[in-house]
């Protein structure tokens, strides 16, 4: 486990990302700590399957249409 400051991490990012491949690197900023670690290998088995939240996601076009309809209803009442 390695703990570094944000300034040190920004200065030597390559070094700490290389270290994170084999272990955990903690970045300390004030009272907060952030962890840098390898998320997954470059292998198809390691990718997560879409969950229910992702399957219920909407596109920006769908959001725009819904908001547009609500705005029209609000102005129609006035």
Image (cartoon, rainbow, N blue to C red):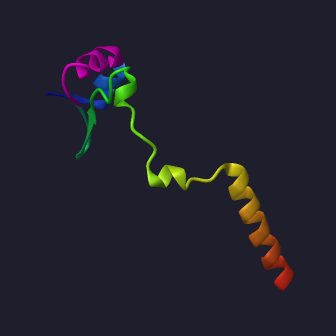
Q: Quadrant of the N terminus?
A: top left
Residue 20 on image: x %, y % = 25, 22
In this orientation, which residue lies closer to the viewer: 36 or 43? Answer: 43
Work out which residue is located at the far left of the displayed protein and give it. Answer: 1
Does residue 48 appear to the left or right of 64 in the view shown? left
Tell me: 8 left or right of 77: left
- The vertical placement of 45 against 70, above or below, is above
Locate residue 59 relative to residue 35 in the image: left or right.
right
Q: Position of residue 22 (x, y in %)?
A: 20, 19
**Quarter where residue 37 is shown:** top left
Q: Position of residue 10 (x, y in %)?
A: 36, 24
Q: How many marks?
A: 0
Residue at the outermost bottom position: 78
The residue sitting at 73% across, 51% down in the picture is: 61
Task: Say if 59 sits above or below 73 in the image.
Answer: above
Query: Could you say which is closer to the camera, residue 31 or residue 64?
Result: 64
Q: Which residue sits at x=70%, y=55%?
A: 62
The quarter of the rendered structure image containing the C terminus is: bottom right
Determine the residue positioned at 40% across, 25% down: 44
**Residue at coordinates 78% horizontally, 64% vertically from top-left?**
68
20 to 75, vertically: above or below: above
Q: Nearer the viewer, residue 11 or 1?
A: 1
Corner quadrant of residue 35: top left
Q: Position of residue 72 (x, y in %)?
A: 82, 72
Question: Quick check: is 60 in the magenta stretch?
Answer: no
| Chain part drawn in magenta | 12-25
**Which quarter of the figure has residue 30?**
top left
């Amino acid at each position: 486990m390695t703990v570094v400051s944000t300034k040190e991490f920004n200065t030597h990012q390559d070094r700490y990302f290389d270290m994170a491949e084999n272990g955990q690197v903690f970045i300390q900023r004030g009272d907060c700590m952030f962890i840098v670690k390898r998320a997954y290998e470059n292998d198809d088995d390691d990718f997560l399957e879409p969950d229910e939240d992702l399957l219920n996601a909407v596109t920006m076009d769908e959001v725009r249409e819904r908001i547009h309809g609500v705005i029209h209803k609000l102005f129609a009442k006035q």
